[in-house]
Amino acid sequence: MKQKPKLNFDMLVENTETLINKLKAGEINFAILEGFFDKSKFGYQLFSKEMFIGICSPSSKLSQQKIKLEDLLASRLILRENGSGTREILEQILYTNNLSPKSFASNLEIGNLNAIKKLVAKNRGISFMYQAAAKKELANNNISALKIKDFNIKREFNFVYLKNSVFEDQYHKYFDLFNSFRK
């Protein structure tokens, strides 16, 4: 806002499925997505690659151990709602390990990352999210990153818009602007 005080902007925070549907309906111009989308149907630019991590409370017995993914199954899994890119990625990772959210002792589904981080900090369960989304809580030692063997997952965040849009050049300018703020 300091660098571009006259720039008017509306920002919507929703899950991947909702944002894709809004793009298709022409309700939004572009989105930054961390979830899966059909790259053959949309224009896009890679925005960043982020680490996907497991998190727990610092007071959890899991916080200081090197563990296997299967060691977490006795825990309550706190996960995002259906349609969330974070949930889709977690389910894909679990699936490739012959697991699912139902493999855990119990599940709690919440559609808000801040609420999930607060519950994890209070040792009410474990969760998975992007390291960037938990950066402040990790730095303040409110939550801990799980040390899971052979769990080194990095995923794309993409700047996505309708393919062949007449406004594509303008969208690229927005991408460049957003990217300049990250440096």
Image: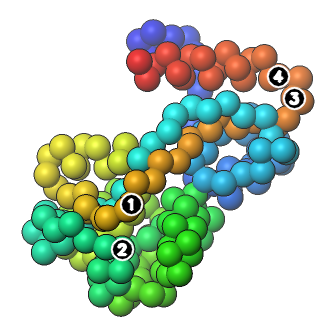
Which of the two labelled residues, at mark 4 and mark 1, occupies the earlier sequence position? Answer: 1
Disc 3 crowd, CA 10 A, few/some/many (<14, 14-19, 20+)? few
Residue 122 visible in image? no
**Image height of 34 relative to 65, above or below:** above
Question: Gap in Å between the C-alphas at discs 2 and 3?
Answer: 43 Å
Q: Are marks 3 and 4 in contact (CB under 8 Å)?
A: yes
Dot 4 falls on a residue whose secondary structure is loop
Q: Which residue is mark 4?
A: 167
Q: Which residue is mark 2?
A: 69
Question: Gap in Å between the C-alphas at discs 1 and 2?
Answer: 8 Å
Three-letter residue code for mark 4: Phe
Q: Are marks 2 and 3 in contact (CB under 8 Å)?
A: no
Q: Are marks 1 and 2 in contact (CB under 8 Å)?
A: yes
Tell me which residue sits at (45%, 75%) in the image: 109
Tell me which residue sits at (56%, 75%) in the image: 95
Q: Quadrant of residue 45?
A: top right
Residue 141 picture location, percent across and down: 13, 52
Residue 164 picture location, percent across and down: 89, 30
Residue 149 picture location, percent across and down: 31, 64
Q: Which residue is mark 1?
A: 151
Q: Residue furthest front?
A: 150
